[in-house]
Structures are given as C-alpha cells and as structure tokens.
Amino acid sequence: MSSLQKSILKSKLPPSGLKFGFTSGGCKSKSHQRKRDYDPVPWSAYFDQSQKIKIGENSFHIYTKGEEGPLVVLLHGGGCSALTWAEFTKSIMTMIVCRVLAIDLRGHGDTHTTDEENLGADTLAHDVAAVIHEFDNSASVILVGHSMGGAVAVRAAPLITNLAGVTVIDVVEGTAMDALASMQSFLRSRPKGFESIPQAIEWCVRSGQIRNVQSAKVSVPGQIKNTESGQLATDDIDSVLSSSDHESVPSFAIQRGDTIQEEETLTMPAPEILPSLIDKKYKWRIDLAKTEEHWVGWFKGLSAAFLSISAPKMLLLAGVDRLDKELTVGQMQGNSSQSTRTSLFLN
C-alpha cells in the first residue's frame, strides 16, 4: 500500500543498518556537513486549483491541472494524499495534452466524510466514480492508481461511463497479500508524531519512504495534521515558510549502512520510545493500523478484476518477480479472448 507497502515488499521490516538514538554524531567536521532544505512546498506550485466537491454530506477534496484533453484521474496509496502525484503531474503535463484530477480518497488528505473508517474497496470505488461524475460526466477518463489506489482504480473501472484506460502501478494481488502480514510491524516502527512539518519531511526522506525530496516537500504536508487545530498541515505551510525560527526544531535522521552520508549525521528515537511522541504538534492524518480490516478486501481478487477490465489497461511493476500466477498466465495468453490490450511494463 503506497510507499509503505513498497518498503515492506523490499525488506519486510525497516531497512537494516539503521542506528537509533537521540543525538547527533558531532565528530563530523562542519566543512563536511550539508544541511538539506526540507521546507514544505505549497500545492499551488504544481496544480491550478484546489477545491471541494460535495456529494451528499461528504466533502471530497481534489487538485486539478490543465484545461483540455482526456481526464487523467490519479488515485493515491494508503496513508498518502492527492499531493503524492504532484511531481507526476508536473511531468505528464509536459508530455501530453490532458487534464489532471487528483483526489484525496476517503479518510485521507483534506477529504471529510460522515464515515471516515469505511474504507472498503467498493466504498472507495463508488466515491471515485461519484467525484468524476460530479466533476465532468462527459470527459474521457483514464484511471491511474498506485498501490491501494491501483486496487481502487480496478474496482472503479466498471463504474466509469467514458473509461478510456486504466493504469495500475506497483501492486499485484499475490505480493500485496504476502506483505500484509508485516504491515503492522512496519507501522509500529514509524514515529507517532513530529514537532514540525520540515521534521516530518526529513524523516520520510531519510527513512526511505519517499526517495524524491521534491515530492516529499509537497506531499508530506498532505499526510499529517496539526493536533492543535485539527487541520491538515497544508494549511500551515505559509506560516512555516514565514517563520524565522522553523529551522531550529530538532530534526530526525537515519544512519544507513548502504548509503553515503551527505549531511550532518543525526539519529532518530528508538522504536521502544516512539510512543512518547504522541504529544507532538503533528500526527499522521490517518491511522493506517486501524484500517487492517480492509486490507484483504483491497487486494483479494485484484488480478482477475484487472484482467477483466474491458478498456485498455497497463500494469507497471518493478520486476517480473512481482507477477502472480494469474497475471503471468494472462500476459502469456495476451488476453486473446478480449478485444482490448493488456500491457505489463517491468523495470
């Protein structure tokens, strides 16, 4: 599920070689220290509009970009937000003429519903279909989903009237189901809170959850909320950037044995004392550990559902080892029984 599931699939636990503790290794020469900029970036640097779509008593938050072309609907992974797609949006708009609609799914980002815990695959799929219908019911739609969002895209596909295509990124039923057994351990390894937005961004980058720094700077504020105001951290970005002392907040960092340290080496709290962070100013927007009842439903039957989509479809994976039996058979057969094309791209 999103970057969290990707990390689990690679290691089953946080990366080896991590050193935990509170204070830094001050033995490094100042001339060898480089402080990376972890200041947040506002959504407006990537999207044209940020708005709410009312559906009944629910309010779904969306970001949009572009004025013409097919509608590319972007669905994020579990624990993330629509801002996860900021850098993707920046790139795709230079390649093709299209419109982008990035949705904060139920329970995530700045979307607010009457039942935040109802994160079943069918519920999320119907949410997406309703948002698209309300936004533009006549547009040709291309669904793009990552991890949990990929599962939602597959379930939403039959509900979209003008579906032109579906792209699923980095999620396969078999490996996803295998990873679920380690998900709770992974979630417990994360800090429960942060003292500042830059600190949260830094932790996500140095822990390897987000490898693109620019993406982290714009997307992390959409994943945490201010415990004092109850608002998403995106609302605090202006005040953070205008503050003269926001860099004075202690930062998180991780020493990794397989990387070259480019900045001052700091250390992060040991897992056993992470609960002491619950009084920090920022917490995760969604408590993923409490969504466990929905995990199997997101991914069970995903391969068959993907192959049954009548529109052109594409699956993007990191390697051929991620394919499960059903997808392997489907690819070898070329979906000859269907009139549409299935493509698998492997890195």
Image: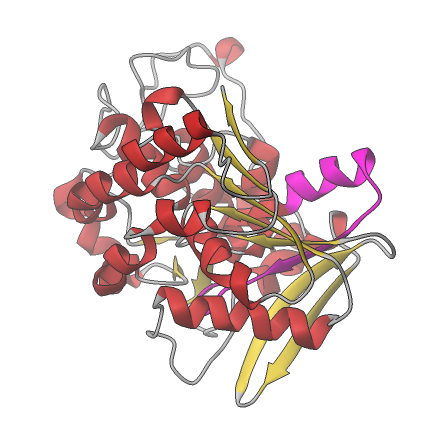
89 displayed left or right of 311: right
> Residue at the location (30% across, 58% down)?
288
Q: Nearer the viewer, residue 264 or 187?
A: 187
The count of marks equals: 0
Q: Nearer the viewer, residue 97 or 86?
A: 97
Check the image and name the residue furthest to the bottom.
57
> Residue at the location (48% across, 15% down)?
262
Residue 74 can be seen, yes or no: yes
> Residue at the location (50% across, 55% down)?
153
Q: Residue 19 appears in which quarter of the rendering? A: top left
> Residue 149: where, in percent of width, then height?
47, 53
Residue 245 can be seen, yes or no: no
Check the image and name the residue furthest to the right.
68
Question: In the displayed structure, would residue 216 be above or below residue 206?
Answer: below
Whether the magenta-drawn stretch holds residue 314 is answered as no
Question: In the displayed structure, would residue 222 be above or below residue 345?
Answer: below
134 displayed left or right of 82: right
Check the image and name the residue furthest to the front.
337
> Residue 45: where, in percent of width, then height?
75, 48
Q: Nearer the viewer, residue 260 or 310?
A: 310
Q: Which residues are magenta?
A: 86-109
> Residue at the location (12% across, 44% down)?
272
> Residue 219: where, in percent of width, then height?
56, 48
> Residue 274: where, in percent of width, then height?
20, 48
Q: Nearer the viewer, residue 21 or 303?
A: 303
39 displayed left or right of 284: right
Whether the magenta-drawn stretch holds residue 103 is answered as yes
Q: How is the image coloured?
A: secondary structure
